[in-house]
Amino acid sequence: MAWRIAGTYVASCSCNLICPCPVDGPPTSEDGECRGVGVFHITDGNLDDTDLSGVDVGLVNYWPSNLTAGNWKLGIVVDDSASDEQANALERIFKGDAGGAFAEFAGLTDEWLGMERAGVTFSDGDRPSGSIGDSSWTFEPLAGPEGGTQTAVKNAAFGFANEYRVGRAPGKMSALGIEFDAIYGETADYEFASEQPEGAAPGRG
């Protein structure tokens, strides 16, 4: 079984700036837990003969402590415009059943929240935005020291990309039973596959 998805994602979570989860630090939200959402726009992708290009999928997470402590809750929301075949393929990928990159997360996940269908959108650009159902957020980049540059994180132990921009992405989020006030945001191009190159995100370390 071979799969690959590539595109751009935009995510938001309840941690204060900057979310320490990618370096296996404890969450910095008021309750010490990380609740997050992300929309992954798939520019190009497939699972075997199922074409996943053009689909938007939302990933919902709950991390009660630092990442390697486990007891995660994960689930996905697939855009209504996707076919049932595409939605089922994405659940197999993100749940880890299809092997590869996301299978690394399965051992840390205590509860799979399931796969639901709803409106999921992604808008690209310097300030990309995402939405899952009634929840929406827009990435607000942190400025770098020189005009026109933006703050980025590179080569973190855990991450959805080897390098990603960081900033704010405020909003009131609710999906798959996970509710929170979002603060932190990040965005990057990504590529995940059943045979992930050594050192590539996610879950390296």
Image (tube, grey):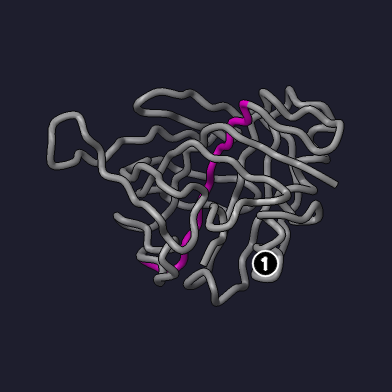
Q: Give the residue number, with chain letter if any, for mark 1.
A: 109
- In this rendering, would 70 be left or right of 14? right
Which stretch did the figure color magenta? 30-43
Rendering quarter of residue 76: top right
Residue toward you, 57 or 158: 158
Residue 70 on image: x %, y %? 60, 73
Predominant secondary structure in magenta?
strand
- Whether 127 is among the magenta residues is no
- In this rendering, would 61 be left or right of 94? left
Q: Amino acid at mark 1?
A: Thr
Determine the secondary structure under disc 1. Answer: strand
Residue 42 on image: x %, y %? 63, 30
- In this rendering, would 46 be left or right of 62? right
Rendering quarter of residue 187: top left
Rendering quarter of residue 155: bottom left
Mark 1 Cα-neighbour bin, 10 Å: few <14, some 14–19, many ≥20: some
Tell me which residue sits at (54%, 53%) in the image. Answer: 201
List the single residue furthest toward the front. Answer: 198
Tell me which residue sits at (65%, 49%) in the image. Answer: 176
- Whether 42 is among the magenta residues is yes
Tell me which residue sits at (35%, 65%) in the image. Answer: 28
Residue toward you, 26 or 182: 26
Residue 125 on image: x %, y %? 40, 23
